[in-house]
Image (cartoon, grey):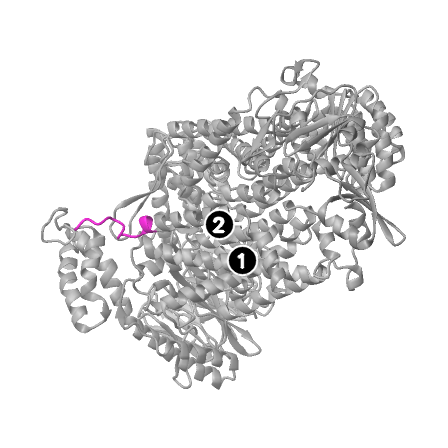
Amino acid sequence: MTRLIKYEFYKLFCKRSILVVLILFSVMNLFKINSEFHSYSYLADGNDSRSWNSVYWQLYEDYRGEITAEKINHLLSIYQPLADATADMTASTAKDNPDMMTGNIYSDRNILDKYYVEPMEYFYHYRTYALQVAERAKENAAVYKERGQTYEARKNSVIYNLYSGRSIKAFAYEEMYNYYLNYDFSGILVLFLCLYGVVSTFVCEKETQMDMLLLTNPGGGKKTTFAKIAAASLFVISVAIWFSVVDYTGFAYFFGTAEGGNLPLYAVRNFSTAAVNCNLWQYAILSAVIRAVGVWTMSMVFLLISLFGHSALVPFVADFGAALCFIITGASQSCFSNVWLKIINPYSLLANRILFGKTEFIGFAGYPVQSFQAAIIFAITVGVVSITAMMMLSKRNSFAGGRRIKCLDLCTK
Amino acid sequence: MSGFMYEVKKIMLRQRGLFYIALVLLFGTVWLALSDNPYDSAMERYKNEYEWYLEKVKGYCTEESSLYLEQEAERIAKAKERQNSLLENYYDGKISESEYKKESREIEKVLERQNGFEVIYQQYLYICENAENRCFLQTNGWMGLLGKGTLHFILFLGILLIVTPVFCSEYSCQMDTLILTAREGRKSALYKLLIITTVVLFLSLCISLIEYGFYRFKYGLPDGDYPIQSIRYFADSSKDMSLLEGYVLIGLLRMFGGVSLTILLMFISVLAKKYAVTLLTGAVSVMIPYIGLSKTSIYRLPLPLPFLLGTDFFAGDIVMSDALTGDEKIIFAEVDTVTLLTLLLVSVLLCTLAVVWILRRNSNRWLMKSGQKKRGAVFVVMFGLALAVTGCSGRGKTGSVVYNSSAGYDCMGYEIIRDAGNFDYSLKNTSTGETYPLARSPMFGIFSDEEEICAFYVCPPYLYYTTSVMESYVNRVGNYNSNITKVSVVELNLNTFEEKTIFEQMTNSGRSLLGIDYETGDKWKFLDFHHAFFLNDDNLFFIGNDGITKVNRYTRKTVKLDIPANGNISFDGESIFYKNEQGVLTRYDVSGNETYTYENIVAYDFCMDEQSIYYISRTDGGDLYSCGKDGNNKELISHIPAMSVTCDTGNIYVLSKESGEEIVLPKSHWTSVL
Amino acid sequence: MGKYAKGIYALKDFTTELTEGVYGLLGANGAGKTTLINIFVGILGSDSGTVLIDGQDARTLGKDFLSKIGYMPQYPFLYRDFTVMDFLLYMCALKGIPDEQGKKRALELLDIVNLSDAKDKKIGALSGGMRQRVGIVQAMLGDPEILILDEPTAGLDPSERIRFRNLISKFAQGRTVLLATHIVSDVECIAKEIMILKEGSLITQGTTDTLEQNIYGKVWEVTVNGEDAARLGSQYYVSNMKQQGERFLVRIVSDLLPASDAVKVSPNLEDVFLYYFRGQ
């Protein structure tokens, strides 16, 4: 079987066109990451000694690491006078003030505000916020228990456990991770590439009449179908992981650092109510795995659809249309609290902050299940059902039992 | 049958071209009808009033029209003021009924079109920003027709389905070699190109015409000769063209976009000879720049995408202010005419080269003048393309309860209290004194100061409340295209404390969906300003300063009700009770959309419970009366002149006009107070 | 004519002159037969050389050249959804034959190839042999002066192959037929001349007799036991081996006497083919 999978993989995916598309998409992805940095980071203003980039990294050495009262006082001692001086907007707008780090008082205030005061304030206060949530959850659990609401009580217990120990003890640069975690573009590229790769898995055999030949071999039929599915799975998972690696590497390269990886996930504001307690680098790995699961599920659905096509045309357009629907509904529903819609849409796994950014639950047999857990279970179930359907619907040799080959199919070949 | 007709038959019937055309037109029309919302809903709602004013100022803003609008604004403001004092004077007996009626008629005449005036006045303010190229006109039709910068996905998928098999099918059945060796084989490719181009042109034209017809029928498309800047989408455009010209040009550009996509697909299909590669290239060439590139970049690429979108070739700069530095950032840079023409020229050139190459590839070698030039042509097309790319809730459970917007809430033994320090709402058990946070989610409001509770409605055993939150879609510098404001209606079961969200809506448009601007229009703006609400099984009613908006819970259709929101609003599950502009109690049946006026009840204030309406009579100097819901069985409750009245299950609360104190009248004993 | 691609000559200095009659183009797989045909019919461009018809360059003739040729590709799939008649009429349109005339011609040809009953059948429902016959009918529609057939009998059963051969003979009257194949028996009886193509070069051309004569004395037969038959098979090019009781009659193509008791025999076209393609 391993040999069969190897050959199927080689036959279907080790093609020049796929390699070309993979390279092209990887390059496009890197361009896009670069444009994210230049469009959205204030630190993309060059390496001039008065640029924000230089000033930020100069200051960084003073404030990185454990958040202490000294550091906070030191920061405020610099920031507060600037804030006071600029509060009424009557300060000098000169851009070459030698007393200023960036040459301008407003600019100094802004860089400190944006990159040090705001994040430090958030980091520092996070423990209190989390404690409040934990306290509320604990109270809620007791109230619900009293009222016989087992599910709600359990849910709040989970929330309590999740939030009770949360705190951000150290200060680090988290901007790169902020953009990395909110980056969706590569997910779309992965989807397109996988769509292209898998759509011809069955269609190709039909076009070359190899499906009939395969049926006459002991390794044909069911075994080949399984080998194709396994090869396609291997391909899509590899592609998803490849792009996750390109994303991470690209962001680290263009932002010039991978600092902040040890910060907890909730250090990124969008993830203040994150569903898991892990570090940013751990989440990067988790995210890659979850994305691979999402891509795999969608690919299995694509594969199932392509089983019914004689040429790549209708399956491709149908799959493409389905992918667009998943993407558009997934992206537009991402801000809403209808957890079920997020769970059943595999796009949520591709852009997985939809699931991990918020602590959301669904009830299953009276037990709270986090949205990301339910989405993973659902996605795997859909994938397995698709595989089962493919195995059942694929043609078999009539002597091997199961579905017979239609007479018409043989006559017309 | 001629070769041309055979090709037509092959494409239209054998390759299901006709079926796909019908499908695109059908789905395109259905989608258009389902997804359309008026850009300015007030203009639509007060259409007649608005048009009355429009008739007077139509066209460019002249000194006369400006003067007229300013005077009219003053006249309306004065009339409103006069109306209030007139009513006071009448009920205080200072003027007679005939005097009141006479003056009222005059005032009503002034105010009868005030809603429409507000719409036109907003338009006037917009026009004043640049009166030289902006005109007064009905804008909803034109905004719908021209103000969409999104891709027509149905047309795009249709083109993929129709164009891809044209050459690919020949390769898959190896007919290409037979056609190549036939005397008229070369014509076959030419016919294919002509037929498919015509089909795509026809489809694009039909979609443009359907859109035109739809908006003309639904909103009207008057005054097409007015400058395109008259509609907000093109506010800062420097293009000198009329709306109709804009429509025609955008339509033509979209047609060209369709044709260039067709040629690109044909080029790839002849080059790769495979369905999958052709489809992938076609999909990627449109979707990747659409999602991955900024609008400014898209409109500078010689690809089919900018032409398929079309609209923003004529839009002006979009500038936004950076939230941190205050610097202005150009979100979209206008495409000047030279750039547009250059882009068009390059695209036409690329298309021509691609067509020539397709024809050469489908020509018998003995019919070619030279076999060497092809590489040059292919190189140019490929280079051009490379350049282009690298530029790169359960129904029926809501019980019947009487709601009074001015009254407190009877929360099944709970009291809603607001913390003066952090503005958090809590539920206080009135018997035990225990307090619970009202919002049951432990995370509510902790991580965002912008997350807050806006209004309440109690319908035992449920307490409904609305929340508003501003979320950052992505914590992006500048904050443009990254924030959303969301209003939700949450249902809290007061027995079990279970809660669930029954309605959610994004109210602002500052959001980008995968790089594509996501517009919500002004349809849901009222949610940002609501201060009270109530609901039944089918609808939600949001009370704002300018009235009540009904929202269907299932279809999400919104209707602005003609109910003034300047006093108490009561709802008994079937009808809304309110004071009309003259202070006369009025009932509006929500299912039948009928209004009934209680002519005998003119009230300063009123409230109601399950059985009775309590009101402070304006005609009787502020006495408190009660009557049945039908307005009959009027009974005097109190002679003490009152300013306002509220009630709960057991008591009636009256604010004395003289002392300014609240007097509690137990419902069971009020007769004894007399 | 010559064609150079991917570092090798697909066709090298090919020159020949064809007159009326059937010409067999013999060659092993990959010898350049299809390349030659593709260049001839204008699917592929040549790097050098041209085709002259009665002294006129095919390029000058342009469309008239195409009117003079009828081409049947290897394994024609054709349009599965078309009926036979629809397909032929479509081909008439492509060939510039007026509709009525085309219809008449198609019916005549269908009658000749015994497919009149199948004219309303969808091509997708036809057997391989029937589809090949539709293929030759389409090639004959324009009554071409030159008929070019690329492996027309590939994949056909013996009876279909014989039927097809007879059809070719019938259609060959008054025209030039270039028949590319690697099946010797297809051309042995019907070809006026045989061209043998090897590695893109025309190595010999002549009538069957001439070609056979050219290798006279290089074909031997010997009757040996099983052990010797196996030894001969490994040492020489055996064109045939026939069991006769306990012993084997072995036919060998060799420049030298393979065994002392071997006797010279008259070569046939298969021997010629084997002689030229020894080692391939």
- Please indicate whether residue B251 sits to the left or right of residue A308 in the image: left
Q: Residues within 10 Å of mark 1 (few under 14, many from 20)?
A: many
The amino acid marked with disc number 2 is Leu
Residue B562 in sight here: no
Main structural element of the magenta stretch: helix, strand or loop?
Answer: loop
Return the residue nearer the eye: B183 or A118.
B183
Residue A45 among those drawn in magenta: yes
Q: Write down the region rendered in magenta.
A: A37-49
Q: Residue at x 47, y 50 (%)?
A: B523
Say above or below: B672 vs C264: below
Residue B23 pos. (x, y %): 65, 42
Mark 1–mark 2 distance (CA, rounded to whole Å): 12 Å
In this view, the residue farthest toward the top is C55
- Please indicate whether residue C166 sits to the left or right of residue B54 in the image: right
- In the rendered image, which residue does mark 1 sit on? A236
- Please indicate whether residue B292 sits to the left or right of residue A96 in the image: right
Does dot 1 land on a helix, a strand or a loop?
Answer: helix
- In the rendered image, which residue does mark 2 sit on? A22
Return the residue nearer the eye: B228 or C133.
C133
- Please indicate whether residue B356 sits to the left or right of residue C201 in the image: left
In this view, the residue farthest toward the left is A98
